[in-house]
DNA sequence: TCATTAAAGGAAA
DNA sequence: TTTCCTTTAATGA
């Protein structure tokens, strides 16, 4: 099973179980290049294509006019995005932006559907990838409904450790260029609040942190902070 | 309990 | 240097 952590908003994927299906889909795609910060599509737009990240990093989020943002996912290579608007022909509900210089396969949905008619197994792969995101959306809703600020941060750190954690001398490092503002936009908290909570966790010797990186030094204690009633952050 | 505002420190480009 | 990221405190919903 490729997905050991189906609930992280930071999405990576190992394609090894689906190389043939990916190849078939990409055979009808064209390649497009995006610069860092370049918008790929905007919420409200309609689309006849969906996308596959060949190289780079893409953020999908819902933007508001006042500049605030809810990040839905940050995705790395070998992942799909923009499927919903393509397959159901309704406008995008989210905006996609390249976070770094990226190479994106653009897949026209009509051609993808033709591929699926001929190779139905491609549909199963697509369904599984879409459910992966459905699941992560569900878990995000759960956190919004039930968790206080500290637990939201604790939970997202647990998920990020599982998805992109890198073992190091001190513990497990999360080093993906995410700012406190990014974490705030994922968890629905303010940037200042994220900083305060991370500082509290550092004081409690659960994590250490530096610019753009957090290292979990006590994963058991981190996990234990999800248990019990909501606590103050001191 | 948490958002907002403001003001400032520090690191990176 | 400028820009980006982080910190801290004060205020109030």
Image: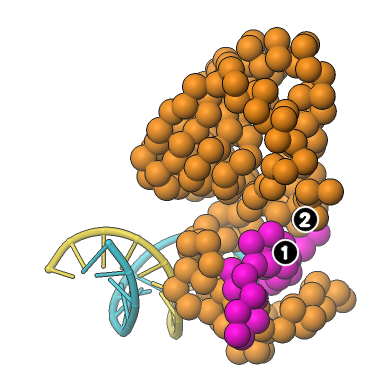
Chain colours: A orange, B cyan, C yellow
The location of residue A28, given as percent across then percent down, is: 58, 17
Q: Which mark is residue A162?
A: 1
Please give left or right for residue A213 compared with residue A115 in the image.
Answer: left
- Depth check, front residue: A210 or A70: A210
Q: Which residues are magenta?
A: A146-174
Q: Are marks 2 and 1 in contact (CB under 8 Å)?
A: yes
- To the question of a shared chain for discs 2 and 1, the answer is yes
Badge 2 element: loop
Q: Is residue A107 above or below residue A201?
A: above
The chain identifier of the residue carrying mark 1 reads A
Q: Is residue C11 above or below residue A146?
A: below
Q: Which mark is residue A217?
A: none
Question: Seen from this angle, which residue lies furthest right?
Answer: A228
The location of residue A142, given as percent across then percent down, is: 80, 53
Which quadrant would the C terminus of chain A be assigned to in this image? bottom right
The chain identifier of the residue carrying mark 2 reads A
On the image, numbered disc 2 is attached to which residue? Answer: A5
- Give the residue drawn at x 75%, y 47%: A136
Q: Is residue A81 above or below residue A212?
A: above
- Depth check, front residue: A183 or B8: A183
Please give left or right for residue A143 compared with residue A50 in the image.
Answer: right
Q: Is residue A162 magenta?
A: yes
Badge 1 element: helix
The location of residue A62, given as percent across then percent down, is: 56, 39
Please give left or right for residue A195 compared with residue A224 in the image.
Answer: left
- Give the residue drawn at x 69%, y 59%: A163
Question: Seen from this angle, which residue lies furthest front?
Answer: A20
Q: Residues within 10 Å of mark 1 (few under 14, many from 20)?
A: some
The location of residue A178, given as percent across then percent down, is: 51, 61
Q: Is residue A196 visible?
A: no
Q: Is residue A131 above or below residue A139?
A: above
Q: Is residue A22 visible?
A: yes
């Amino acid at each position: 099973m490729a997905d050991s952590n189906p609930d992280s908003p930071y999405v990576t994927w190992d394609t090894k179980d689906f190389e043939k299906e990916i190849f078939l889909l990409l055979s009808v795609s064209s390649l497009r290049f995006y610069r860092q910060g370049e918008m790929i599509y905007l919420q409200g737009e309609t689309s006849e294509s969906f996308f596959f990240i060949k190289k780079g990093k893409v953020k999908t989020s819902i933007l508001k006019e006042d500049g605030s943002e809810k990040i839905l996912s940050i995705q790395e290579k070998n992942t799909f995005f923009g499927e919903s608007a393509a397959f159901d022909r309704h406008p995008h509900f989210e905006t996609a932006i390249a976070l770094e210089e990226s190479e994106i396969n653009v897949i026209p949905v009509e051609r993808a559907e033709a591929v699926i008619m001929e190779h139905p197994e491609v549909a199963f792969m697509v369904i599984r990838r879409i459910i992966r995101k459905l699941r992560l959306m569900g878990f995000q809703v759960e956190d919004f409904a039930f968790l206080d600020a500290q637990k939201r941060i604790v939970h997202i750190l647990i998920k990020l450790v599982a998805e992109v954690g890198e073992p190091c001398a001190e513990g497990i490092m999360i080093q993906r260029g995410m700012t406190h503002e990014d974490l705030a936009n994922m968890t629905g908290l303010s940037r200042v609040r994220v900083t305060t909570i991370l500082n509290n966790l550092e004081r409690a010797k659960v994590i250490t942190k530096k610019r753009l990186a957090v290292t979990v030094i006590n994963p058991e204690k981190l996990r234990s902070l999800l248990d019990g009633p909501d606590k103050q952050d001191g």
